[in-house]
Image: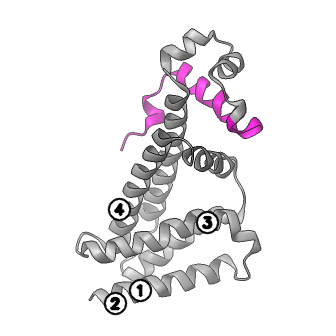
Amino acid sequence: METVAAQLSEKELIILDCAFDLLKETGDTGMTMRKIAECAGMRLSNVQYYFKSRDDVLKTMATRYFDACTQEVMEVTRINPVSTVRARANLLIRSGLAHGDHLSDMCRIFRELWAISSRNETIRDHMAEYYRNFTSLIADFILGQTAGPKVRDQIGTLLVPFFEGYSVTAQSTPLSTQQTADMLTDITMLIVEKDL
């Protein structure tokens, strides 16, 4: 699976890195096309050659992050072959919750993207498409292709928002990450077993 980052030119990567830094340092309001150009040491017209608008920059930043998350899930599942549904669920859940153990720069940026998506339909739609794909990826790994759409939707609806919210709240919850993973695995199995 080729990622967006693998398809980008060196200049596009420089532009995205500058946008990333600006978004991290100044938030949404400080990330203008002009400031991105200044940071990248380019003229505004050069930046606009690669990215027509600020939304294009934001969408590509989000896709780059999404690709990294998807690759991480695929790598975890590839190097940890497990055979039972419970073991696959627990492995994936532990991996998904690991982001709550520390607040990475990508988590900070993603919070900014969430905030932007609440005001920007283009970014909201882009993120919604990612989450639909990510939900399917999670269901595929845990359940395989045999489970029906209802149980797949229930698993995704449980886990995806939990993973995202946990990255924000993990440090303040009373259960450890392992205890939380075990609890979510038990809930996931109740959904799966109810469908059998």
Query: In front of the other: label 1 or label 3?
Result: 3
Between 29 and 165, the residue placed more toward the observer is 29
Q: Secondary structure at mark 1?
A: helix
Residue 91 on image: x %, y %? 49, 73
Please state if 152 lies on the left or on the right of 99 as rendered.
left
Which residue has dot 4 on it? 136
Which label's residue is closer to the chain start, 4 or 3? 4
Which label's residue is closer to the chain start, 1 or 3? 3
Q: Which label is found at residue 83?
A: none
* Figure label count: 4
Residue drawn 55% across and 35% down? 58
Q: Residues within 10 Å of mark 1 (few under 14, many from 20)?
A: some
Q: Secondary structure at mark 2?
A: helix
Residue 146 on image: x %, y %? 22, 74
Q: CA distance from mark 2 to mark 3?
A: 26 Å
Query: In front of the other: label 4 or label 3?
Result: 3
**Amino acid type for the residue under numbered disc 2:** Glu
- Whether residue 81 appears in this view of the structure is no
Looking at the image, what colour scheme do you see? one colour
What secondary structure predominates along the stretch shown in magenta? helix
Region of the chain picked out in magenta, as a range: 1-28
Q: Residues within 10 Å of mark 3 (few under 14, many from 20)?
A: few
Which residue has dot 2 on it? 193
Q: CA distance from mark 4 to mark 1?
A: 17 Å
Q: Which label is found at residue 165?
A: 3
**Amino acid type for the residue under numbered disc 1:** Met
Which residue has dot 1 on it? 189
Q: CA distance from mark 4 to mark 2?
A: 19 Å
Q: CA distance from mark 1 to mark 3?
A: 21 Å
